[in-house]
Amino acid sequence: MMKTELELEKIVVVMDQALFAKACEILWTRPQIYDSIIPVMGNFHTICNLLLIIGKLFGNSGLRDLAVESGTIAEGSIRKVLEGRQYNRGVRLHKL
């Protein structure tokens, strides 16, 4: 096993959101077997979740109207942007 060859106490495994959810289920049911594995969700999915949280917090407070009326995001795309599904548009909106 790579962990023993490298003489590590713990090993970090970076994965996408779907695999992260399954890995956490497995690790929670058998913590004594997999106690040396640390699952980490990748940056892309972490940012998508952050965009979703921002969209939920500020979507009804005028962010939706501001983005559409300023021409930053099209009216047909704003829902997906605030749900964290349109990564590029969401990052551009939140940067502005």
Image (spheres, helix red, strand yellow):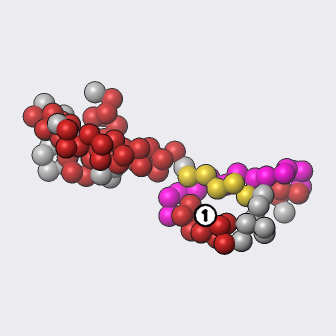
> What amino acid type is highlighted by mark number 1?
Cys
Which residue is at 30% across, 43% downward?
Answer: 57
Magenta residue check for 8: yes
Q: Helix, strand, or loop for circle 1? A: helix
Q: Residue 33's x, y, as percent?
A: 78, 69
Magenta residue check for 17: yes
50 or 81, which is in the foreground?
50
Quarter placement of the N terminus: bottom right
Does residue 69 lie above or below 40 as drawn?
A: above
Q: Residue 36's x, y, as percent?
A: 78, 58
Q: Residue 81's x, y, as percent?
A: 27, 47
Which residue is at 54% across, 49% downward?
Answer: 42
Q: Residue 89's x, y, as percent?
A: 28, 41
Q: Is residue 35 visible?
A: yes
Callout 1 crowding tier (Cα within 10 Å): few <14, some 14–19, many ≥20: some
Taking the view exactly as shown, the residue that stands out farthest to the top is 96
Which residue is at 73% across, 58% downward?
Answer: 37
Image side of residue 52 versus residue 34, left or right = left
Which residue is at 52% across, 45% downward?
Answer: 43
Segment tinted magenta in the rendering: 5-18
Quarter placement of the C terminus: top left
Image side of residue 17 versus residue 13, left or right = left
Taking the view exactly as shown, the residue that stands out farthest to the left is 69
Image side of residue 68 versus residue 41, left or right = left
Give the residue at mark 1: 24
Q: Is residue 88 visible?
A: no
